[in-house]
Image (tube, grey):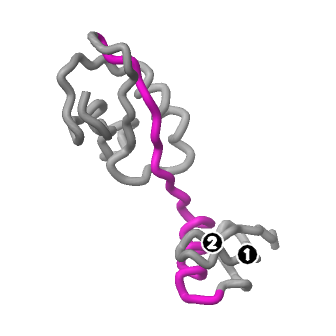
Amino acid sequence: METRYLTCIGCPMGCQLTVEVENGAMVSVTGNTCKKGKEYAEHEVSAPTRMVTSVLTVEGSAEPLSVKTAQAIPKEKIFDCLREIRKARMKTPISIGDVVVHDVCGTGVDVIATRNL
């Protein structure tokens, strides 16, 4: 049995969770004050995901373009995603929501612009 300590981000409370894990599956969770804590812990133990934000250089602009994944991607693909973003080449004009990288790392999630440039 393994014990993991997490800070829940399911609601503003930020509960300190203690999660017991066996064979990659959650056995128990304590410390949560609402059901979101249990759901967060289960997801974090079984298939953690993260939103990825970054910036990239744009041809024709002195300012970098801020970008993000349209949805959360598997945590283990974060660095691969950042490498793909680094390879992207964009030219102005760019609008919020324009796709910068389609289906990043085979996740089915696009990387999109978060501002007009």
Q: Is residue 9 left or right of residue 26?
A: left
In the image, taking residue 56 as reference, residue 117 lies left or right, namely: left
Of the residues shown, which amino acid type is indicated by label 2?
A: Cys
- The residue that appears at 64% across and 73% down in the rendered structure is 14
**Mark 1 in CB contact with mark 2 (< 8 angstroms):** yes
Q: Position of residue 38 (x, y in %)?
A: 59, 82
31 magenta-colored: no
Query: Residue 5 at x, y = what percent?
Result: 76, 68
| Vertical order, 59 against 36 (above or below) | above
Vertical arrangement, residue 41 with respect to residue 86, above or below: below
Say whether residue 19 is visible. no
Residue range corresponding to the magenta coloring: 33-59
Answer above or below: position of 37 versus 69: below
Residue at the image position 54 percent from the left and 88 percent from the top: 35
- How crowded pointer 2 is (Cα within 10 Å; few <14, some 14-19, many 20+) is rated as many
Image quarter hosting the C terminus? top left
Q: State which quadrant residue 41 falls in.
A: bottom right
* Disc 1 from disc 2: Cα separation: 6 Å
Q: Which residue corresponds to mark 2?
A: 8
Image: 78 above or below 49: above
Q: Secondary structure at mark 1?
A: strand
